[in-house]
Image (cartoon, rainbow, N blue to C red):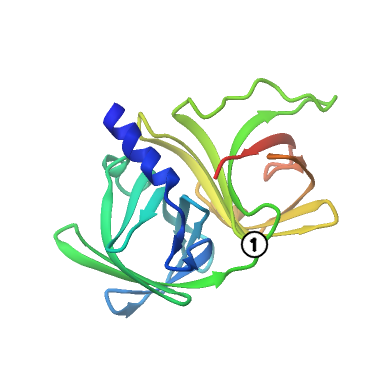
Amino acid sequence: MKALMKFLMIFILTASVVYGQSLNGAWKLVTQNGKPFTEEAVKIYSDSYFMFAIYDKEGKFIKAGGGIYSVDKKNYTEVLDFYTTDSTKVRQPVNYSYSLKKDELTIEAPMHGMVLKETWKKVDATTSPLNGAWRFGARVNDEGVAGERRGGASPRQTLKILSGNHFQWAAFNYETKQFMGTGGGTYKLEGGKYTETIRFFSRDNSRAGMSLTFDCRLEGTDWYHMGKGTTGNPVSEVWEKIK
């Protein structure tokens, strides 16, 4: 366990800048093993964290994953916190060879008895006060007081990652390798209002296309938002920035 924690800390301390080029932002999968990728696949990077999701053009969820990543001169490496296709891959480092040219990232690695080669194109390099990875902190009561925060020590986490106008959240337990759900899409932040347009939701495909607007404020590394969720029930939460 100590060796694993040391390894993960090296990841966290590794920047997302590769020879002057940053991975931060949202990327779309354009080719897989030389063939055009016909489903929707979006991957969002912060400084040391990433999430991706694949869904069809109608918003039907297919799969998702996320975790920490690192790059050096030769390798691009991912360590997954969750992976809906094969939970045995959680916390198992995967090394890829890679090339990064302007807004195009190509990664390649042996996988499932074959060589997987993917090319991703950056589709969102804009910035926002919400850029980065966030951890669910606590629910907030009617008086505006937050409950006890779960913190980062628990393996049970709900995280959300945002680029300039894309977002994805996921709930998981990296110790038990249990996946609880994920959703994502695009968002706008204007005049204290945060509006999400859902493109996929693993628990209910019918939520794709919904828009939700929340009152939003930032206090240091805390992000408060209040409104109504996909079920119509009130939501009042605080999230804390982590990466």
State the residue lying farthest toward the left: 113
Q: Quadrant of residue 90?
A: top left
Q: Quadrant of residue 31?
A: bottom left
Quadrant in which the C terminus is drawn:
top right
* Left or right of 118 on screen, residue 203: right
Looking at this view, is 124 or 221 the one in front?
221
Q: Position of residue 107 (x, y in %)?
A: 31, 67
Looking at this view, is 70 or 123 the one in front?
70
Which residue is rendered at x = 64% and y = 67% of the image? 126
Q: Is residue 165 above or below residue 120?
A: above
Q: Position of residue 40 (x, y in %)?
A: 47, 67
Which residue is rendered at x = 29% and y = 79% of the image? 34
Quadrant in which the N terminus is drawn:
top left
* Left or right of 28 on screen, residue 211: right
Which residue is rendered at x = 52% and y = 29% of the image? 152
Q: Position of residue 104 (x, y in %)?
A: 43, 75
**Residue 84 seen anywhere in this rendered image of the structure:** yes
Residue beneath disc 1: 164
Which residue is rendered at x = 31% and y = 63% of the image? 73
Looking at this view, is 175 or 13 the one in front?
13
**Residue 204 seen anywhere in this rendered image of the structure:** no
